[in-house]
Image (cartoon, rainbow, N blue to C red):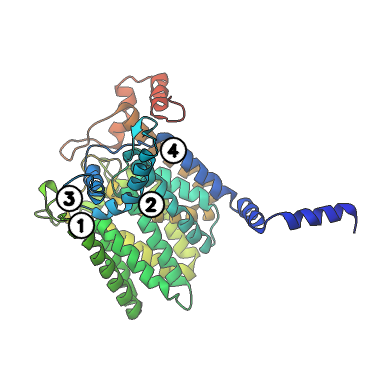
Amino acid sequence: MSSVDHVGDVSRRRLPRSGVRAAAFARREWELLAAGGLWLLFLVNFSALELPSGDEHVQYTFVQRLFGDVPHALGYYFGLGLIEAPFYGLGKLLKDAGLQSIDGHSLPMATVALGLGLLTFVSWPLLAGVIRGLRLRHAGFAILAATLGTPYFYYATFVPGKNHSVDGTLFAAVIYLTYRFLTHSPVERWTPFALGAVLGLSYTVRYFDGAEAVALVAFLVWDRRLRHAVQIALTSAVVCGLLFIVPHAYGVSVFSGGNYSAENVIVFAPLNPLRMLFTNHRGYFVWSPVSALAVLGLILLWRRRPESRKFLAAVCAMGIAVMASYALIPWWDGTWSFSQRFFTPLFPLVAIGLAGLVDAVPRPAIVAAVVAVAWSLFLAFNLVVIGGPQYNSNTPGGATDLALVPVRTNTSLGAYLWGMKHRSHLLGH
């Protein structure tokens, strides 16, 4: 052996195995890591670092009640408060250590706001695993485009504290577990119970997530998996019931209290899902056209991946069930809302559909997705930089109105860029 070969052999032996694996992963998943890095940069740069004065403070006050910082609270969507609790606790620890604020925003509210945004990264490896399992390329691009092209990014960044981004992350976990459950043979024993546990938590974060569970259990019954259907349903009920012990132990009411009473909110409006998809006022396909591209991708996946049709049928049934559930409420437009906020949990399906479309027709799909994402970002920055119509349920207005705000307000390019810089944490100070 030559001296050069000997030196190379020694250097390879000295390199830790973990370092070798990390380097190999970075080379293999460079696109996913680069896309995740761009999302992290966007999130950290534009995160509001505070909670708007709305429903967000209901759950925040519940967290404060858990820590004994306030005497009273409401339990409306208390599951979101439970998820916020670790971030709130971290903020209190940092405050006790002498740190008083993050970029001028007081602790621990800032850690809750930023923490809920960072929680979106849980969905990245989950969706990447599903996309890789479906033998699709460009997982990083698909997930980033779905993140920035749907209301998922808006509620994780500009309006943290609402339950929509957390709802989307939980649905990503449900989709990942459903994929493992339906594609592993024999079935891994833990997956039905894990599915039930995540679903049980999701009910407390957003009540409409019960529609996902109904669709999944119905699909399993149709597929003659009765034992697994029962396991998932019972586990979700038990986990949800145990979580309800928390607000009860603190004397917090869940289904009553002022504007958060569960009374007189049910109607039958079968056209709501269509309004929520197609109208200029708050149509998901209009505000977030990347979702329409994803539908094409899901159709192509159905045709090109026959071995995965059970999985695709199950997750699409869950997505359709979420949409259909909003035929039971009167406020389909979400009142003060960006895009169709009630469809935020559909973000994982958009990522999978986009991956399917890009895999089938790479160049046209990438160009179309970039244009669609640019449109959604343009609308979002018009809203946060300039402002626009209030979009209340009784006020006309929609995507085209918001797109014309720079022209109607005579906002110059320089003023627009200054507004973006002012919203930036990395450039604005």
Q: Earlier in the sequence, mark 2 or mark 4?
A: 4
Separation of residues labelled 3 and 4 (CA atoms): 30 Å
Q: Is residue 2 left or right of residue 61?
A: right
Q: Earlier in the sequence, mark 3 or mark 4?
A: 4
Residue sitting at x 48%, y 56%:
125
Residue sitting at x 40%, y 56%:
349
Amino acid marked by disc 1: Pro
Amino acid marked by disc 3: Leu
- Residue annotated with mark 4: 44
- Residue annotated with mark 1: 247
Dot 4: within a 10 Å radius of its alpha carbon, few (fewer than 14), some, or many (20 or more) residues? some
Q: Is residue 90 left or right of residue 62?
A: right
Dot 2: within a 10 Å radius of its alpha carbon, few (fewer than 14), some, or many (20 or more) residues? many
Separation of residues labelled 1 and 3 (CA atoms): 9 Å
The quarter holding residue 49 reads: top left
Amino acid marked by disc 2: Phe
- Residue annotated with mark 3: 74
